[in-house]
Image (spheres, rainbow, N blue to C red):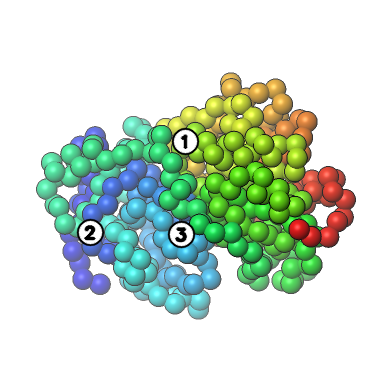
Amino acid sequence: MTLRVAKLALEDGTVYTGTSLGATGEVTGEVVFNTSMTGYQEILTDPSYRGQIVTMTYPEIGNYGVNSQDVESDRIYLAGFVIREYSRRASNYRCEQSLDEYLRSQGIVGIAEIDTRALVRRIRIHGAMRGVLSTEDLDDQSLVRKAQQSPGLVGRDLVREVMPREPREWDTPLHPLAQESFPPGPQPPPAPRFHVVAMDFGMKWNIARWLRQTGCRVTVVPGDTPAEEILRRRPHGVFLSNGPGDPEPVQYAIKTIRELLGRVPLFGICLGHQLLSLACGARTFKLKFGHRGANQPVLNRRTGRVEITSQNHGFAVEADSLPEELEITHVNLNDQTIEGVRHRHVPAFSVQYHPEASAGPHDSSYLFRDFLELMEQTHGTAPATG
């Protein structure tokens, strides 16, 4: 890998100088950080990172390379990638190419050899900031101006930039390595018992794999699909996916969810949780620096257990705005924000975190079985027709 200078500038005037990783060029985005020790490939391909420059807090990244089986979408969606140290040796029996080669092939600009601890500390103190990452313009003042003039995330509908254009049937189950929650070991998925329509706002593929593995026929539809068209498919349940950015501009999805409430069981994850809450009359707000990582502690109020969860969101549901019909089921133990709700009168629930997480943890995978049970209670044991 040929070393080339790259710079990351923040809107507050801070500039970090390092070496180029991946493609050359210049990108803007909101600079955030993720505290996961592994799973950088899943982070790179998560559509929820659209419009963001992602910093990894773990100091060495790239040591196990990249493979074609662990992707969470059809390409990399984040704006740029920031790390402390790039591992030039990728050592894993599943490795197909290096991280640098992968970023280059996808046209993603990255930077290495900067003080990520200082960067993350600044974000934690001052909040997530707009930034610019460049290998072309290396003038500090120019880069800071570009960062200050770049668009933020608030008020932007990023879902339209990542959702699919056409419906499709999903039939891929979990990878055998991910089936530890299905004792006594890797098993083929059961015959579909229920038909689930998944509204794709930028859905991670592992969600669809989990739904298929638990015995669902899965039809994935674009996130702007109207309620009438969804109901014409005769689903036993509707899943509301994760996705990027501010939930409040996604009014078309909020309208659809409001029309589906009480007519079919609903299960939402991440953005889907926020959209369900908004459809019920709640409000959302932007977090100071968001929750991104695989080690977020969440209290399940119904069981009293603490679950270690994977999270990726910069917005949250405002507790004071929650309508009476929504019960808080899960709470983040770091800042007491809402991590899950359940409707008191109709079959609908959601969580802010990612129970399907790859590369883990899997503490909350039971939620997919909860969705199955909700459809069972509503429809009985009907076959997956429609």
Q: Residues within 10 Å of mark 1 (few under 14, many from 20)?
A: some
Kind of residue at badge 1: Pro
Instruction: Name the residue: 46% across, 48% down.
Output: 160
Of callouts 2 and 3, which one flags the residue occurring earlier in the amino acid sequence? 2
Kind of residue at badge 2: Gly
Instruction: Name the residue: 67% across, 45% down.
Output: 228
* Residue 148 in the figure: left or right of residue 42: left
Residue 240 place in picture, x, y as percent: 62, 46
Of callouts 3 and 1, which one flags the residue occurring earlier in the amino acid sequence? 3
Kind of residue at badge 3: Thr
Q: Secondary structure at mark 2?
A: loop
Residue 9 place in picture, x, y as percent: 23, 44
Instruction: Name the residue: 14% across, 52% down.
Output: 138
Q: Is residue 239 visible?
A: no
Quarter the C terminus occupies: bottom right
| Residue corresponding to mark 1 | 249
| Residue corresponding to mark 3 | 45
Of callouts 1 and 2, which one flags the residue occurring earlier in the amino acid sequence? 2
| Residue corresponding to mark 2 | 25
Q: Residues within 10 Å of mark 2 (few under 14, many from 20)?
A: some
- Give the distance between the C-alpha atoms of the residues marked 2 and 3, in whole angstroms: 19 Å
Residue 15 place in picture, x, y as percent: 20, 44
Q: Secondary structure at mark 1?
A: loop
Q: Are marks 1 and 2 in contact (CB under 8 Å)?
A: no
Q: Is residue 93 above or below residue 279?
A: below
Q: Is residue 125 visible?
A: yes
Q: Secondary structure at mark 3?
A: loop
The quadrant in which residue 215 appears is bottom right
Viewer-closest of 308 and 127:
127
Residue 282 place in picture, x, y as percent: 59, 27
